[in-house]
Each structure stands twice: as structure tokens, then as C-alpha cells.
Amino acid sequence: MAVFARRSAQSVRSSAAVPPPEASPGSVHSAASLWADGFGRVGTRSLQVLAVLAVVAVCVLAVTQLTLIVIPVLIALVLAAAISPLVSFLRRKGLPRLVATWIALATLVVLLSGVLWLVVGAVVNQWGDLRDQALDGFDELQGSIQGLPFEITAEQIQSVQESVAGLLRSDAVGSGAIAGVSQTVDFVAGFFIMIVVLFFFLKDGPQLWEFLLRPYEGRRYERGKRIGNATVRTLGGYIRGTAIVAAVDAVAIGIGLAIVGVPLLLPLSVLVFLLAFIPLVGATVAGILAALVALVAVGPVEALVVVAIVVVVNQLEGDFLQPVVMGRTLRLHPLVILIALTAGTVLAGLTGAVLAVPIAASIWRAVQVWDGPDLPARFARKKRQEAV
């Protein structure tokens, strides 16, 4: 037994002295090369894209499930950015922050109440006449189209007519605006949430942003400050500029409609003002509606004059008024605006269509100041052109 024990100990020591087998360089290289070639890089990027899409999908799902909170907070943020210069002005005049906040909030409520009064008095009360005029104008337009040299089938005309009629029916509009007691309760709750959040944004907005930036230091803290300031300026400038442009459009087109003799002047002008907050699409819808009313009320020549007035006003607005009023607030490609409008409409309906573009503009502005006041993020920088 002693001999057997000594032999076992020697075998254990000899096995311990032998180093473990090393992995061959070829196997390590082959494993690494699976991710180093073209397919490996594509696989890595695909996994990263899938992870980002999963995070975006979760965020979108959360937004769609929490619209009662998200939408009022976003509206409050946009309105606070728009009226924050008034709070700053009152603060510079020596008023306490609380008093300045209440004055600014009361001013905003008065303005919104005036717009709501115009909408209810001019549009809602005359929506039946406006709808009938537009549908009659579409019927006349349908008869004119059938006499054109190129062929338009009756099925196509009927499909368009049903779509327009469904959009302009008062019951469809009413069901979209107030669909039962539950949605009315949601609207009231969302309105009060918006007012409360707006009050605290106006009163403690900079302090709230400073609280969110507490975990960051140095360059990251400065970046957060730049992004916050740029976002507030972009959102506020967009809302104030769009309101000015919308008011000018409504007055100019209203004067043109009065000269031509188009009836329902006030509701059409109010609709021009409201639809101006939806880029690209709003002006087109307002112009079509005004032309259809003019076609029935005064005739085809006058309807063409209305179309010309709308086109000229929109062209002057895009070439002269918007660059002066809005400056660099909104420098987005029309395709980006269209995608943002579509996404906002799908997620939150008409409210999403109004909020989508200023939010997209503020995100792009944040990218432009990511690495410095005039230094965009690396992926957004222009490529240097090499000298030939």
C-alpha cells in the first residue's frame, strides 16, 4: 500500500508539472475571423439595429399606452417654450417669479380662449353650411372632370367623393372630436394635467432641467445645457413664428376671398389659420376647401382666382415671410417633415400631426449643437471636400 501511495503521489506531481494544452493560434484566428469579415460586420450591425429597433418599439408602445400623460406634457412643453420669453421679460422688470408665471399663464389662457371662441363661433356653428358648399362644389368639379379628354373612371370619382364626404360629414367630425363620455373625461383630465404641468414648466423650468443634469459633469453637463437651451429656443420660435405666419395667411387669404365675393369668409379664414400649424398638408387642404366653396357660390372663374390667391400667398410666405420670422428655427427637408407628420398622425392623430414637426426640428437642432454651439454631432457634419 505504501508503494502504491508513493507512485500515486509521483504521478500527481508529474501531471501537475505538465502545462495545460494551449489553444492553437489557428482556432482563435478562425473564431475571430467569423466576425471580422464582411458577413460578420453585417451580422454585428444587424444585431445593433435590432436592439435599437426594440428600444424604439418599447418607447412607441409606452407613448401609445400613456397618451393621457404624454400628450398633455408635450403640449405644455411646447406652450411653455413659446411663452417663456414673456416670463423672462417680466422677471427682468423686477416681478417675482410666481407673479410673472401667473401673468404669463393668464395671458396664454386668454389667447387660447380667443382662438377657441373663434373656432366654435365661426367654424363649428357654420360647419353644416361649409360642408354642404364643399360637397356641392365637389359635385360640380366631378361633372367638369368627366368632360376632360383623358379618361377617369366612375369608380375612381365615386371613391374620391365618398372619401371627401366622409371627411366633411359633421357626424364624422363630431365623433372624432368627442366620442362619448369617456373621451370627454379624458379630454378634461388631460387639459388640467396640461395646465398644471405648464405652470410648473413656466415657474421652475430651468431648475427642473438642472435637476435632470445633476448626474453629469464637465463636457456632458455643458452638452446638456446646450441641448436644453436649443430645444426651448427651437420649440418657442417655431410656435411663435407659425402663429405669426398663420395669422398673416388668414388675413391675406380672407381679404382675397372678400374681394372675390366668397361666402363663409370667417370660418374659411379661421380654418386657414388653424391648418397653417400643419406644414405641407394644411395649406393645401385650406386652399381646396376655399376653392370648392367658391366654385358653388360664385362660379368656376372665381374658384380659379381663389386657387391663384392661395398659391401666391403660400409662395410669398415660403420665400419671404418664413425666412424672416422663423429664421433657422425650422431647417428640415420636406421629406423629413412628411415622415414626421405621418408618424405623428399615426401615433396621436391630429395632435400628433401638429406636434410632430416642432419636435423633429428640436431634435435636429439638438444634433446640431451636440459637440459645440456651432459643431454638430460627428455623423451630422459635412464632409470636407478635398482640393482638386
Image: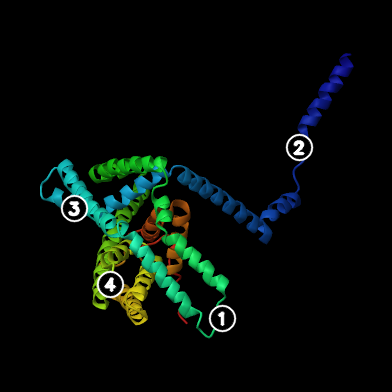
Q: Nearer the viewer, residue 121 or 356?
A: 121
Please say if the residues under marks 3 and 4 sit with CB atoms less than 8 Å apart. Answer: no
Q: Which residue is mark 3?
A: 86
Locate residue 333, reporting x and y percent. Answer: 42, 68
Please say if the residues under marks 4 and 2 sit with CB atoms less than 8 Å apart. Answer: no
Q: Which residue is mark 1?
A: 151
Identify the amino acid type marked 1. Answer: Glu
- Closer to the N terminus: mark 4 or mark 2? 2
Helix, strand, or loop for circle 1?
loop
Please rate how many residues cluster around mark 3, counting C-alpha atoms within 10 Å: few if below 14, some from 14 to 19, many from 20: some
Residue 108 visible, this orientation? yes
Q: Which residue is mark 4?
A: 253
- On residue 20, the disc is 2
Helix, strand, or loop for circle 2?
loop
Please say if the residues under marks 1 and 4 sit with CB atoms less than 8 Å apart. Answer: no
Question: CA gap, disc 2 to disc 3?
Answer: 76 Å
Question: CA gap, disc 3 to disc 4?
Answer: 30 Å
Helix, strand, or loop for circle 3?
helix
Q: Is label 2 or label 3 in front?
A: 3
Identify the amino acid type marked 2. Answer: Pro
Please rate how many residues cluster around mark 1, counting C-alpha atoms within 10 Å: few if below 14, some from 14 to 19, many from 20: few
Question: CA gap, disc 4 to disc 2?
Answer: 87 Å
Residue situated furthest top in the rendering: 1
Please rate how many residues cluster around mark 4, counting C-alpha atoms within 10 Å: few if below 14, some from 14 to 19, many from 20: many
Please say if the residues under marks 2 and 3 sit with CB atoms less than 8 Å apart. Answer: no
